[in-house]
Image (cartoon, rainbow, N blue to C red):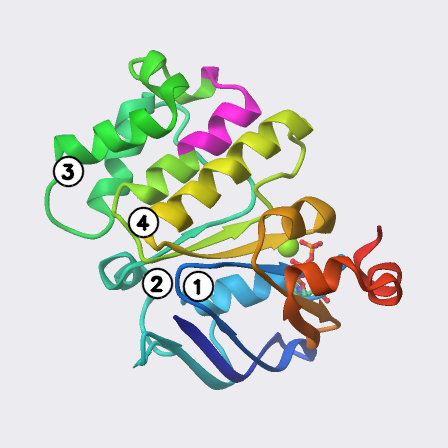
Amino acid sequence: MLTLDRLSAGYGPVRALQDVSFTAAKGQITAVLGANGAGKTTLLRTVSGLHRAESGTIELDGKPLRRTPAELMPALGMVHVPEGRGVITELSVEENLRLGGLAKGGKVRPEDLHRAYDLFPVLADRRAGLAHTLSGGERQMLVIGRALMSEPRLLLLDEPSLGLAPRIVAQIFDLLRGQVDDHGLTVLLVEQNARSALSVADHGIVLNLGRVVADEPAAVLAADDQLRHAYLGF
Ligand SMILES: Nc1ncnc2c1ncn2[C@@H]1O[C@H](COP(=O)(O)OP(=O)(O)OP(=O)(O)O)[C@@H](O)[C@H]1O
Ligand SMILES: [Mg+2]
């Protein structure tokens, strides 16, 4: 379980997050929604230690994390998949997956690779190919597969649906749902595509100008016409 309490962060004079408090329950998908510039990416970067919070607390299963360096997070069970599907294009699919396994320290186990290939058979077919030959959807699968190599308890995903065909988005979200339901994974899913995100999420947080304006079960948010029109664009 991830708990944020009065978390604030910014960039010089820009207040990107102001007193953000919420809990992402264990074994659930919590969607973080909001318009351009609402603070969604800053939130993920602050939680994963890539951006420094100014005040407030971050706890993962009761353990304070606010001052933990980003590179130690995988060993603590948290993996962040940033926006943009960054893979190392000069390496093969399998080499990219191995990097995910190394992130938490120690060796890459064959069973971790098998798990990624079972989840994404398309990656198994392409395992020896260079990552730059993958399509956008395949790259998104590779970055999620790479993140899951270290068996995280908490997965942070920034706009995984961006630029992908609806069919691929549905496939990726179904798979996430399976990881949550079958393995108790906790997911914090940042999306501008609020409609799709709420269809897979259990719970939703809406940010506006760095503040939480709604914290409700996904079905409640999806049924709230006023809130949808004001903040979610559908
Ligand atoms: N590196 C930066 N330097 C200065 N200001 C920044 C920086 N990154 C983000 N901001 C500002 O912080 C605020 C929050 O931005 P953030 O990227 O977290 O929003 P977002 O919700 O992820 O937006 P988007 O939907 O466009 O990805 C915005 O006002 C943005 O302009
Ligand atoms: Mg963003």
Q: Which residue is mark 2?
A: 70
Q: Secondary structure at mark 2?
A: helix
Report the Cα–Cα distance between label 3 and label 2.
Answer: 20 Å
The residue nearer to you, when weighing 120 against 143, is 120
From the viewer's perspective, is residue 182 above or below residue 65?
above
From the viewer's perspective, is residue 101 above or below residue 25?
above
- Chain-order first, disc 3 or disc 4: 3
* Label 1 crowd (10 A; few <14 / some 14-19 / many >=20): some
Question: Which residues fall within the magenta stretch?
Answer: 133-142
Q: Is mark 4 within 8 Å of ligand 2?
A: no
Q: Which residue is mark 3?
A: 108
Q: Which residue is mark 4?
A: 183
The residue nearer to you, when weighing 57 against 130, is 57
The answer to whether marks 2 and 1 mark residues whose Cβ atoms lie closer than 8 Å is yes
Q: Which residue is mark 1?
A: 50
Query: What amino acid is found at the position of numbered circle 4 in the picture?
Result: His
